[in-house]
Amino acid sequence: MIPTEDASARKREIEEKLKQEQETLSFIRENLEKSDQLTKGMVSILSSFESRLMQLENSIIPVHKQTENLQRLQENVDKTLSCMDHVISYYHVAKDTDRIIREGPTGRLDEYLACIAKIQKAVEYFQDNNPDSPELNTVKARFEKGKELLEAEFRSLLTRYSKPVPPILILDAISMDEELEAPEDVVLEHLPEAVLQDIICIAGWLVEYGRNQDFMNVYFQIRSNQLDRSIKGLKDHFRKNSASSGVLYSPAVQTKRKDTPTKKAPRRPVYIPGTIRKAQNLLKQYSQHGLDGKKGGSNLTPLEGYDHDPRVKHHPDALTEKHGAAAGKDDVLDIEIDSYIHCISAFVKLAQSEYALLMEIIPEHHQKKTFDSLIQEALDNLMLEGDNIVSAARRAIMRHDYSAVLTIFPILRHLKMNKSEFDSTLQGTAASTKNKLPTLITSMETIGAKALEEFADSIKNDPDKEYNMPKDGTVHELTSNAILFLQQLLDFHETAGAMLASQVLGDTYNIPLDPRETSSATSYTSDFNKRLLSTYICKVLGNLQLNLLSKSKVYEDLALSAIFLHNNYNYILKSLEKSELIQLVTVTQKRAEVSYRELIEQQIDTYQRSWLKVTEHLTDRNMPAAQPGSKLKDKERQVIKDKFKGFNDGLEELCKIQKGWAIPDKEQRDFIRHAQKKAVSEAYRAFLHRCANISFTKNPEKYHKYRPEEVEEMIEKLFDTSA
């Protein structure tokens, strides 16, 4: 049970808390009432403010709307005035641009194009808004005038600044190959940069706004003329300078020394004037004199071992001296050939440069057609010149002047080596344009193959004319000319082989085809062409051998006939070995060298048999079997006398005759002399030994005319007119 005091205290505590809570509640109620009053006051103020705002809005909105309307009206007025000014400006365009249009675009192209743009906009305005107005006709006329002056400026700039490329610069450009050392490529700048930019700008305007393509015709005509003039200038450069200085190159381009080793061959073959001319001189000499029978002897080029025999006047320089006029004509031909070869390379280089220039000026879809037209004149002139070369060769072949084919070789080789670059340059042109070079190549191959075949036939059918035979049995000019011709083929063996293959001559020569080789001439392999050329050379040599054998029968003396064949066979063999023709011959004739050596030995044996009529007097046949000191019968003494006399007369006769014969090859001459000296001397010494102790005459010196040493000296003087 809780004590009474504690309960009272507890009650008082609770009452005090209750009183405090009641006071707090009263305070809260008072504050709530004040808050309600404040809220009502705020609501009243806001309501009043809202009312005033509404009044203000009702007053401002009409003013705002009026202001907007006024601003809009002001803008419309400004726009109208601006449009009026713009429209009025179209009516003044003709007057404002009259001076600039009349004076033309020269020197102020940007300003001029800006005026043209104004005129063009005026034309568009009047066409759209007032097509019947006289102003439209005025601005149209002004626009056309401006366009005409732009076209005239385009023509004027091209004409004024388009110049032929200097020949020296062209030579620099076409000489840039792997063999040449130059610090940088040669750039062919056709137009100054500022002028080029003006031309590009005018061309772009004419295409986009002028709706005119006539300027493209103007462009190709002017540039075509300059291209043709550049090539003609190069040709004139050669005519003026090549005769005295040989092959022309620009002094700006330094070539390597000849003895500088190079790992790569040059891309472009260099034709050196004169390499073919001497051969042509000799071949023409033969065709003009040899076939007519007015000249005998030989015109062959000296070989090693063919020393200073005075009867062998065969150096081409001697021929040149005798035929100075012909040589001068051939010099001109050399220059023409060299010039044509360089002009072909120049055309490719210049055409590539022209196409690069054209791409900057002419619209893309017109570039190929314009380029095709641009190159036609220069290309046609080159092809015409090539056709003239073919025609001249054809006429020469009809006259049996087969040296003309030598003119074709360097040109044809150069054309074929540059064909891929040529085709690449003409890519996209008309088929007729692209076919011009292949047509020329085909013509040259056809006429060249014809000349080769007819030359082989001419070697076979050359007549046996007694007055055309060398009296001393030296090399016949038919041999020297045939070898000289074949040596030129060696220089152009790839071209000659392809030339024969192009005419499908494999069947003629019975060349076995590799299964991988087709019947198409263009697909013949290099090996096949080499075999074909080898067979052709063997055919010529075979025809030559048969003809020489026939010609040798003209000689009544079999020994001279043998010397003649020996000299010719030996010359052929030495020529083949010296010129490396033998390597080409052995492609199809493995024993060619051995065969010629056997032929040479056979002729030496035949010649040596001519001395049997001398040495037969020295044999034991009919020789009396007498003992030393015994007395011979008159008949026996006469036999010995006859032997001495027969030997002496035969020796003198042969030495007299054979001293006038010729063996130009010193090695062969010495060999034959030595062999003959040995054979005759030994037989003569043996004969003298047998007769030493036999008394067959009271005057032995009458019969014993020559000592063995004197016989040897006489034989040593054979084949030597200077002795």
Image (spheres, grey):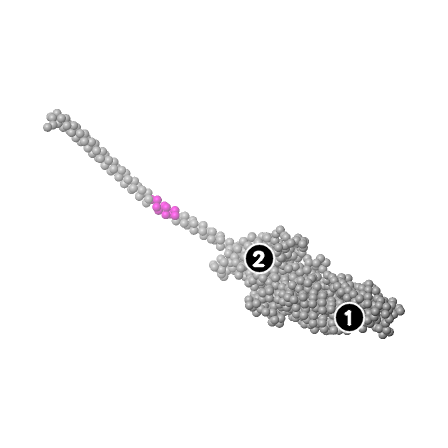
> With 66 as the anchor, is 84 left or right in this view?
right
How many circles with numbers are drawn on the protein?
Answer: 2
- Disc number placed over residue 356 in the picture, else none: 2
| Residue 711, x across and y down, in percent | 82, 65
Judging depth in this view, the residue of 30 and 122 nearest the camera is 30
Which quadrant would residue 167 be assigned to in this image?
A: bottom right
Residue 114 visible in this rendered orientation of the protein:
yes
Image point (60%, 66%), residue name? 528
- Disc number placed over residue 612 in the picture, else none: 1
- Which residues, given as a range, are shown in magenta? 59-68
Image point (16%, 30%), residue name? 18
Judging depth in this view, the residue of 144 and 267 nearest the camera is 267
Which quadrant would residue 479 be assigned to in this image?
A: bottom right
Can you name the residue that lies furthest to the right here?
Answer: 698
Check disc 1 and give the amino acid type: Leu
Q: Residues within 10 Å of mark 2 (few under 14, many from 20)?
A: few
Judging depth in this view, the residue of 44 and 184 nearest the camera is 184
Image point (72%, 69%), residue name? 602
First-in-chain label (2 vs 1)? 2
| Residue 81, x across and y down, in percent | 46, 51
Can you name the residue that lies furthest to the bottom here?
Answer: 635
| Numbered disc 1: secondary structure | helix
Image point (20%, 31%), residue name? 24
| Residue 547, x across and y down, in percent | 71, 72
Judging depth in this view, the residue of 510 and 690 nearest the camera is 690
Which quadrant would residue 138 be assigned to in this image?
A: bottom right
